[in-house]
Amino acid sequence: MTPVLVTGLPRSGTSWTGKMLAAGGELVYVNEPLNPGHPPGGCPGVLDARVTHRFQYICPDNEAVWLRAFADTVALRYRFLAELRRNRSPYDLARLVRYGTAFTLGRLTGRRALLDDPFALFSAGWFAERLGCRVILLLRDPVGLVGSWRRLGWAVSPRELLGQPLLVRDHPCLAELRTLADCRDPVTTTVALWRAARDVAVALAARHPGILLVSYEELAADPVRGFRGLYDWAGLTWSSRAERRVSRACTASAGRPGGGFAWSGLSRTAYRPMDSRRAAAAAAARLSREEAHRVRRLAAP
């Protein structure tokens, strides 16, 4: 069965999009298997391979271990023994039960895997070609992205990307980050990453029919219509259940009982029920007019 990958830079709406696609009940949601942190990364039951970089790059030249590991993941084969050998804390065991049950029931009931993983962005072509994924690649406006990263205190280290020669070889636009290797201005480095990700995303979508570029802002502005189209593109059933849950979740207001629905538990996804249109505007509003102008200037081709 065809797996689905939702990717894009972190804070581009991948968790939200993944949860809305899973709302129809045909997918098993898998949160960030390529995240090198623990949790949610470092889970050999989910992905039995060691992730060493943020934005771990996977291509035919280094695919041997990754192809084997991801073949299990997208087939929903949970590696119980591999998980137990590495992780045994109470939280780890609870996560094992959650994911092990979800994988096993999903496989037995014919569900498909949905990978929500922003760290798969630069490897999206490999996921489309070698795993047959239908890839939804989200692009977010740079002002909104920088505003969201600022709120969380995030910054990108160009060295994390430059330290992967195969990645720079296959996506030479990333070589421009070398001039920023020692830059301490988070706005400059975040926009540089955004610009590289945009160029890579456009190039990948042009080469791979299994990759669809989606504007986060356009999806947030009309989520019911947008997700109906994504369901059709991914081969999912747009049922009354899916429409109802997407509509409720994307129009949630703080403090309004029943305004949305939530998944709780161990995935640690960034998604929360929200009014998607307000959420998209709120991130951009975190920057002053002068800062927004600077971001747009830096993001220009």
Image (cartoon, rainbow, N blue to C red):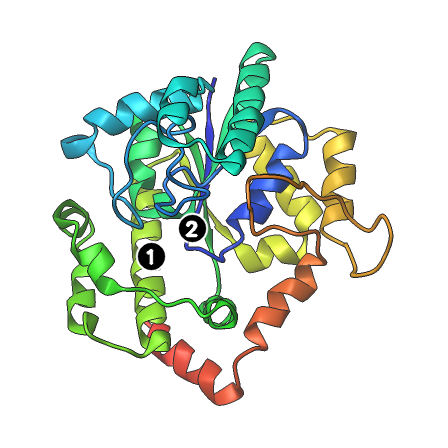
- Please determine whether, in this image, residue 140 is positioned above or below residue 285: above
Residue 148 in the image, given as x and y percentages of width and height:
51, 67
Q: Choose the circle earlier in sequence order: 1 or 2.
A: 2
Q: Amino acid at mark 2?
A: Gly
Q: Are marks 1 and 2 in contact (CB under 8 Å)?
A: yes
Residue 125 in the image, given as x and y percentages of width and height:
30, 38
- Secondary structure of the residue carrying tag 1 is helix
Residue 233 in the image, given as x and y percentages of width and height:
54, 33
For image coordinates 44% across by 68% down, the residue present is: 142
- Please determine whether, in this image, residue 127 is positioned above or below residue 216: above
Q: Nearer the viewer, residue 155 or 301?
A: 155
Residue 38 in the image, given as x and y percentages of width and height:
41, 44
Kindly identify which residue carries mark 1.
197
Q: Is residue 122 visible?
A: yes
Q: Amino acid at mark 1?
A: Ala
Left or right: where 102 falls relative to 120: right
Left or right: where 95 falls relative to 191: right
Quadrant, the C terminus: bottom left
Q: Which mark is residue 8?
A: 2
The image quadrant of residue 208 is top left
- Please determine whether, in this image, residue 62 is positioned above or below residue 111: below
Crowding at label 2, few (<14), some or many (≥20) Cα neighbours within 10 Å?
many
Q: Is residue 173 visible?
A: no
For image coordinates 52% across by 80% down, the residue present is: 287
Residue at the farthest bottom position = 290
